Image (spheres, helix red, strand yellow):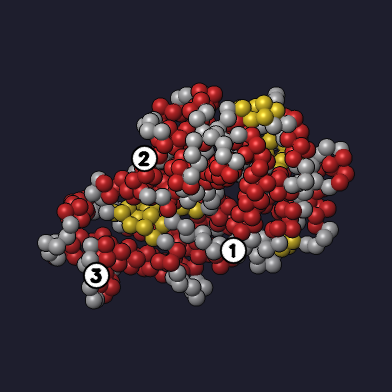
Amino acid sequence: MDFSEENIAALFGHEAAEDEDIERLKGYYFKGNVYGQIANDLPIRILVGHKGIGKSALFHIAMAEEAQRGKLSLLIKPDDIAGIGENETDFLKLIREWKSGISEIISKKALVSFGLLHDGWRGKLNEYGGKFIDYLQTTFRADSYANLQQSKKLVVDDFLKSGKIYVYLDDLDRGWQGNTKDIRKLSALLNAVRDIASESKGVSFRISLRSDVYYLVRTSDESTDKIEGSVIWYSWTNHEILALLVKRVEQFFGNSRTTEELIKLTQPTLAQSLDRVMEPVFSGHGNWSKIPTYRMLMSLVRKRPRDLVKLCTLAARNARTTNDGVISTKNFNSIFEEYSQGRLQDTVNEYRSELPDIERLLLGMKPSREEKKAKLGYVYTTESLLSKITNIQQSGIFKFHGGKVADKKDLAAFLYKINFITARKENGDFIERRYFEESRYLSHKFVDFGFDWEVHPAYRWALQPDNMHDIFNTLKASAD
């Protein structure tokens, strides 16, 4: 196997799937159960999940399929809505500004997409009281489409008949700081979308949010309970993650396998498709001695497709430098620290806006000398986790953005929310791990639900790069 950069990208996919060529993305995209819950005609769908879990990729596939069916769909990005309601302090007026702003953005994007933007369009929209579907249908009927491509004519014709428009709002949490202003802004946006969907029956909104962002807005603004029924939590099982990898590898070798076909196979059967690119057995140490390679992979990804792409890509690049035809244990061992440091830095970058001193907190979770001697660290009861955090606090208090002092339970909840720690329960030789988006209220006031806590395996090499053997000896692989 030649692990050139081109082949690696073709094997494992682009790190950011939404940046992939759309035809190639459609070829290897893994449609799980969540897809059908989002890609439908319901007025509001809010897709909630961690960064790197595939929200943008899902949106791009859904938009591409709608375009193929001749449907009118638009993508709204953060730059499009910058400045809306920036100085408004009255919440009701803020919602009104968002309603007006979103209606204008939808109208403008629709007109631009067909080359029909004209002077005075905003005034015409106002004459319709902001009812952009009525305005657009009237405008499209009044114009000549002689110069439109056939595909665009089909979209216009469908819109004139159905009055349906699909609006995607993606990456809205870019620059999120978790302060009162951010929460009010996002709350107003969600309220505005709900009002627009109620008043304009033909519009279907699709909104993506990071899980921690939605959780903070949901628990800070009681008005958001009205849209809770529209929220779809995006999560992956290990089985789906493995099937996703197999689908990409199979496509590379010219085999077309459907999502439905792959998901029915057992994990050992799925893993056989990977033998052409990586050794089937991982020859690690301790609890990781001669375990299936796929089980090692599932233990180190945080149930995010992007983690899997990164881990396999780094190992494949190392295999290229050693002229190996398949990715081996030594290739994985060589990149664990780099992979782990990357996930730690990603987490710091993603959540520093919420907790400015996050790096001190995360690095403080490194096992102490006493913990190493006792072969402890990484795994905690609720009591020992809070004690560990208390020790970290001795080097200085932690404050969330805006100045709110974080106590030890706040910090423990924060670590769970960002998936730095996971809930865990022993299951024989393996571990059952529970993530924030799967049990997002599990850590509420740290009531004893029968789970302990552990630092996710993805971070351990970054916290303890000096002793790989200790990590293997204390780390159990994930269960199926």
Pointer 1 with pointer 3, Cβ within 8 A: no
- Where does label 1 land, which residue? 177
Q: Which quadrant of the view contains residue 39? A: top left
Seen from the viewer's position, the closer of residues 469 and 175 is: 469
Left or right of residue 30: residue 472: right
Q: Residue at x 16, y 54 (%)?
A: 150
Residue 117 location, quadrant? bottom left
Q: Secondary structure at mark 2?
A: helix
**Residue 308 point in image, percent of width and height:** 55, 41
Q: Is the Cβ of the residue at disc 1 closer than 8 Å to that at disc 2?
A: no
178 vs 58: above or below: below
Badge 3 element: loop
Disc 3 residue type? Leu
Q: N-terminal of the two: label 1 or label 3?
A: 3
How far apart marks 3 and 2 lie (CA) works out to 35 Å
Whether tag 3 and tag 2 are in contact, CB under 8 A, the answer is no
Cα gap from disc 1 to disc 2, whole angstroms: 36 Å
Q: Which residue corresponds to mark 2?
A: 27
Q: Quadrant of the C terminus?
A: top right
Q: Where residue 117 is drawn, which disc sits there?
A: 3
Classed neighbour count for the residue bearing mark 1: other residues with Cα under 10 Å, few (<14), some (14–19), many (≥20)? many
User: Quick one: 85 or 261, which is closer to the camera?
Assistant: 261
Q: Is residue 365 left or right of residue 292?
A: right
Left-right relation of 402 to 316: right
Determine the residue positioned at 55% across, 42% down: 320
- The residue carrying pointer 3 sits among few (fewer than 14), some (14 to 19) or many (20 or more) residues within 10 Å by Cα, namely some
| Residue at image coords 55%, 34% | 326
- Quadrant assignment, res 300: top right
The CA distance from mark 1 to mark 3 is 35 Å
Amino acid type at circle 1 is: Gln
- The percent position of residue 197, horizontal first and vertical second, equals 35, 55
**x then y, percent, for residue 98:** 41, 66
